[in-house]
Amino acid sequence: MSVRPILIAPDPRLKLISEPVAEVDDHIRALIADMIETMYDADGIGLAAIQVGEAKRIIVLDVEQKEGGRNPRVFINPVITWNSEATEVMEEGCLSVPEIWDEVERPRAIKAQYLDSHGVPQSLDAEGILAVCLQHEMDHLNGVLFVDHLSKLKRSMALKKLAKAKKLKKAG
């Protein structure tokens, strides 16, 4: 296992549409282990493979991590099969858009199907933070960042703030 560098917007690879995983093999399991280690190292609760430069439809999540627990979950080739009409607004951030936080409206509850790290089909009913996090990470698989859900003005302001922070980091 190793910590991998996380791509930072506006890296064009973050806009790629990730490819489905054909077979869950040792290479995929090694990538998953690296992703989990990278997510914890960055103090995140979710990470999509594209964020570490791998255009594969893989997500790791651990919504319990912020409360000091460890319960990593793996979603390979996830698909949302249902979402509620009721929505919820939550503040979101992203490891690929560091230090930018804003409110995003998403369906409050979802149902998803996916493969686990052994290639076994699974299904999940999720609501609250788990539903939001899964939707956020699934957006990454389709080349969408959470700032893409913001108004044009808010998105522009967020990306300018990110660019300014990058310049200051390089200068320092």
Image: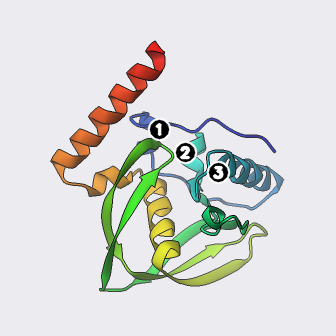
Q: Which residue is labeled 3 in the image?
A: 39
How crowded pointer 1 is (Cα within 10 Å; few <14, some 14-19, many 20+) is rated as some
Q: Quadrant of the N terminus?
A: top right
For this orientation, the residue located farthest to the top is: 171
Q: Which residue is labeled 2 in the image?
A: 51
Residue at the image point whose x is 69% and y is 64% from the top: 68
Q: Nearer the viewer, residue 37 or 76?
A: 37
87 on left or right of 16: left
Task: Tell me the CA gap for discs 1 and 2.
Answer: 8 Å
Question: With respect to residue 21, does 27 lie above or below?
Answer: above
Q: Amino acid at mark 1?
A: Arg
Q: Position of residue 93 (x, y in %)?
A: 43, 53
How crowded pointer 3 is (Cα within 10 Å; few <14, some 14-19, many 20+) is rated as many
Question: With respect to residue 116, does 4 lie above or below?
Answer: above
Q: Which residue is labeled 1 in the image?
A: 13
85 on left or right of 29: left
Residue at the image point whose x is 45% and y is 67% from the top: 135
Question: With respect to residue 131, does 169 lie above or below?
Answer: above
Task: Tell me the CA gap for discs 1 and 3.
Answer: 18 Å
Residue at the image point whose x is 70% and y is 54% from the top: 36
Q: Nearer the viewer, residue 165 or 33?
A: 165
Question: With respect to residue 154, does 114 lie above or below?
Answer: below
89 on left or right of 81: left
Q: Position of residue 56 (x, y in %)?
A: 59, 52
